Image (cartoon, rainbow, N blue to C red):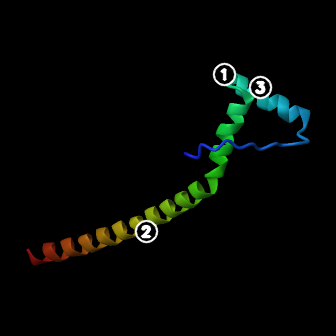
């Protein structure tokens, strides 16, 4: 987000209740409504990437869990064989 070129996004026909709630949320954080919306739009702009990263991470954790379980089973089998050799 290092793009320093100023740009604007205008949102028309927002419900007055929505605008009031956004103002209230911004005031609760002691920032302007514009800053509040900017932060949320910046977060929204990377949300899909974050969801994909999270999904990939969850998949990796599942795979690692399976590998660890397999290693545990193999070590238990080896231990049993070593105990039988004693």
CA separation in Å, label 1 and label 3: 10 Å
Quick one: 1 or 45, which is closer to the camera?
A: 1
Residue 27 spot, x, y in % from top left: 72, 23
Quick one: 62 or 69, which is closer to the camera?
A: 62
Q: Within 10 angstroms of label 1, few (less than 14), some, or many (20 or more) residues?
A: few
Helix or strand or loop: what does disc 3 sit on?
A: helix
Q: Which residue is mark 2?
A: 63
* Residue 45 located left or right of residue 12: left
Mark 2 vs mark 3: which is more N-terminal?
Answer: 3
Q: Which residue is mark 1?
A: 30
Extreme left residue here? 86
Q: In which quadrant will I find the C terminus? A: bottom left
Mark in front: 1 vs 2: 1
Which circle marks residue 57 in the picture? none
| Residue occupying the point 45% across, 65% down | 60
Mark 1 vs mark 3: which is more N-terminal?
Answer: 3
């Amino acid at each position: 987000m290092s793009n320093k070129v100023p740009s604007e996004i205008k949102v028309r026909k927002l419900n007055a209740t929505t605008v009031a709630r956004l103002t209230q949320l911004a005031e609760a954080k002691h920032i302007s409504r514009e800053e509040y919306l900017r932060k949320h739009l910046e977060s929204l702009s990377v949300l899909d990437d974050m969801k994909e990263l999270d999904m990939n991470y969850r998949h990796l954790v599942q795979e690692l869990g399976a590998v660890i379980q397999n290693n545990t089973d193999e070590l238990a089998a080896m231990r049993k064989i070593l105990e039988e050799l004693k």
